[in-house]
Image (spheres, rainbow, N blue to C red):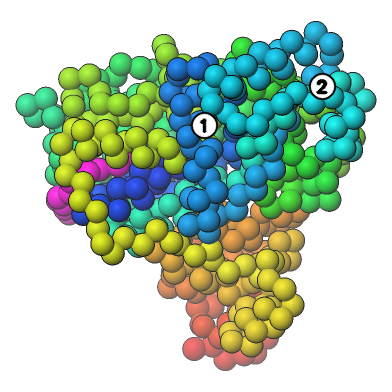
């Protein structure tokens, strides 16, 4: 393999919501930035598997990084999500006490929240809870109401951050695991991936579950990442009405507890539990774990119907030991290597504020930050058939017939959206990449019907054979061998069932 060498000012390692946010904030300045990601797409680490809540900020102990960046990040969500065309709903959140001995804990959270600077917190009684949440348990007696809490789409945010960063000049390298970092004279000077050497002035470590390994590459493994797994049920939109706000139980020492929440797409999400696991790849769901999740969730909303479950998944929290707090700042002895590590919950909420802090820290470490006059903070929301009214749908289909051609019937995703997603500024080459960008395959049938049609469109648009299309990069091929018939024409109909092989002539 031919190695290439490139030169940059800053390498950001890891394209989760933290790394992409940092890259985007850096793209405001006249600075060369390379964002390096081991996976075939952005947002495939912890960013794709969490509760998607924008926390208000009453959980963390005052004075911690978690508390500071949670409250600051929360306040940034309305603007950031508007600039980047990302779904966000300021629903407010409730911590619900279901037994008298839990009520004093609500007061503790209220006081902690006030100390952290969370606005608008109040304790409410059962009558008000039922007004807000008609399906709440009859045991609910009081709740902490946090009006600044909300919900968002974590992968939408990371994809939008990455696209906006690339549109503003950042280089992104996907399928590029960092394997080594050279340190010379106490500074990180070179980052290696299997095919590229990157000469750099600064390195940012936003590698999530692997951030301790990356810090170890510069001899500064001052913390260990301990993964803590959380499992979920995702229910059909039919059950979406059962919670109007994220509903928390009173938290434990280890977790905010099992949450029942609407998603921005209208599903009901239930979870997570919290379990220390050995490896960074243990994303299995277990019968015992899921039992714990549904039992906990039904203490808040007893009528959750498991027959409406459409999928289960798990995410891993990257807990930094020994501190348990976010690790943000230059590594000991390597001042140009900046950690954004141990970003467990509320890291999604905190990410926009962490990005600003990392840019400040790079400036303090000597990076020259001159604003670019042509920085464009706006990344328009990609059009979605599901979000259009009838007139908009007719107009879109009249302009381009592919916008009238439904591929994913569960989520009403058209061929037009899939084609558009395949040609944006961050490369999208996989079935999962299409799912996270368009929701094709994210609905009730989980891709059972649309999967083969999406594979055909990816193959056609990227000019590859269908059996080279993967679910999530690497060796995750969707087809194990050539299909009976393959078609790479661009007639726009070939993804239709029955079209191929009916006698049409294909170019
Ligand atoms: C169960 C659960 C529930 C949560 N719920 C919430 C919530 O509701 N609200 C909230 O605010 N937060 C929540 N969080 C926390 C939130 O999900 C994380 O804080 C956030 O996603 C962390 O983003 P990140 O970019 O640091 O990590 P990641 O998304 O894991 O990104 C790190 C990236 O680095 C890449 N990488 C790793 N090693 C290398 C390498 N050698 N070379 C190149 N790239 C590499 C990975 O592939 C990955 O893409 C939750 C977390 C979990 C697990």
**Res. 437 visible in picture:** yes
- Label 2 CA crowd tier, 10 Å (few <14, some 14–19, many 20+): many
Which mark identifies residue 71? 1
Pointer 2 residue: 142
Q: Give the quarter of the image for residue 113.
A: top right
> From the Cβ of disc 1, is ligand 1 less than 8 Å away?
no
Q: Position of residue 377 (x, y in %)?
A: 39, 58
Instruction: Give the residue furthest to the right.
Output: 138
Ranked by sequence position, the earlier of labels 2 and 1 is 1
Q: Position of residue 485 (x, y in %)?
A: 58, 75
**Is 395 left, or right, of 185 in this rendering?**
right
Q: Secondary structure at mark 2?
A: strand
Q: Nearer the viewer, residue 383 or 432?
A: 383
Instruction: Give the residue furthest to the left.
Output: 185
Q: Could you tell me how far apart the alpha carbons at marks 2 and 1 are, in whole angstroms?
A: 24 Å
Q: Are marks 2 and 1 in contact (CB under 8 Å)?
A: no
**Is 333 left, or right, of 312 in this rendering?**
left
Q: Give the quarter of the image for residue 56.
A: top right
- Label 1 CA crowd tier, 10 Å (few <14, some 14–19, many 20+): many
How many numbered tags mark residues here? 2
As displayed, is residue 340 above or below residue 268?
A: above
Q: Does the segment drawn in magenta span residue 11? A: yes
As displayed, is residue 441 above or below residue 320?
A: below
Q: Position of residue 81 (x, y in %)?
A: 52, 52
Residues shaded magenta: 2-14
Q: Nearer the viewer, residue 317 or 113?
A: 113
Q: Position of residue 425 (x, y in %)?
A: 39, 64
Which mark identifies residue 244? none
Residue at position x 45%, y 62% in the image: 379
Q: Nearer the viewer, residue 59 or 482?
A: 59
């Amino acid at each position: 393999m031919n190695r290439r060498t490139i030169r940059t000012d800053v390498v950001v390692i890891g394209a989760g919501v933290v790394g992409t946010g940092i890259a985007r904030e850096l793209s405001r300045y006249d600075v060369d930035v390379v964002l390096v990601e081991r996976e075939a797409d952005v947002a495939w680490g912890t960013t794709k598997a969490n509760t998607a809540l924008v926390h208000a900020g009453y959980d963390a102990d005052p004075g911690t990084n978690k508390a500071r960046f949670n409250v600051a990040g929360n306040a940034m969500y309305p603007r950031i999500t508007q600039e980047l065309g990302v779904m966000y709903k300021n629903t407010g959140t409730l911590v619900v006490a279901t037994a008298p001995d839990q009520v004093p804990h609500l007061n503790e959270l209220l006081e902690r929240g006030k100390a952290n600077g969370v606005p608008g917190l109040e304790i409410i009684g059962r009558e008000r809870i039922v007004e807000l949440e008609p399906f709440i348990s009859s045991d609910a007696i009081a709740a902490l109401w946090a009006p600044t809490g909300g919900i968002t789409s974590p992968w939408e945010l990371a994809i939008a951050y990455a696209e906006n960063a690339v549109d503003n000049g950042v280089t992104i390298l996907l399928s590029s695991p960092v394997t080594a970092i050279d340190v010379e004279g106490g500074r990180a000077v070179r980052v290696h991936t299997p095919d590229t050497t990157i000469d750099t002035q600064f390195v940012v470590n936003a590698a999530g579950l692997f951030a301790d390994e990356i810090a170890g590459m510069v001899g500064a493994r001052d913390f260990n990442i301990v993964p803590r797994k959380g499992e979920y049920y995702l229910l059909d939109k039919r059950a979406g009405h059962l919670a109007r706000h994220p509903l928390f139980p009173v938290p434990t020492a280890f977790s905010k507890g099992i949450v029942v929440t609407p998603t921005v797409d209208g599903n009901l999400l239930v979870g997570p539990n919290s379990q220390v696991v050995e490896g960074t790849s243990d994303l299995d769901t277990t019968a015992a774990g899921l039992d714990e999740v549904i039992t906990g969730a039904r203490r808040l909303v007893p009528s959750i119907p498991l027959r409406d479950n459409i999928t289960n998944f798990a995410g891993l929290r990257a807990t930094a030991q020994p501190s348990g707090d976010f690790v943000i700042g230059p590594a000991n002895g390597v001042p140009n290597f900046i950690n954004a590590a141990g970003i467990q919950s509320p890291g999604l909420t905190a990410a926009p504020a962490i990005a600003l802090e990392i840019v400040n820290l790079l400036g303090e470490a000597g990076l020259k930050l001159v604003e670019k006059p042509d920085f464009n903070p706006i990344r328009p929301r990609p059009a979605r058939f599901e979000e259009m009214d009838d007139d908009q749908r007719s107009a879109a289909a009249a302009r381009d017939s592919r916008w009238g051609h439904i591929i994913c019937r569960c989520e009403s995703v058209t061929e037009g959206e899939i084609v558009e997603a395949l040609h944006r500024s961050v490369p999208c080459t996989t079935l999962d990449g299409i799912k996270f960008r368009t929701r094709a395959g994210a609905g009730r049938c989980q891709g059972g019907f649309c999967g083969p049609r999406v594979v055909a469109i990816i193959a056609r648009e990227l000019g590859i054979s269908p059996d080279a299309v993967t679910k999530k990069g690497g060796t995750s091929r969707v087809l194990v061998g050539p299909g009976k018939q393959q078609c790479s024409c661009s007639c726009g109909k070939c993804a239709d069932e029955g079209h191929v092989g009916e006698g049409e002539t294909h170019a």
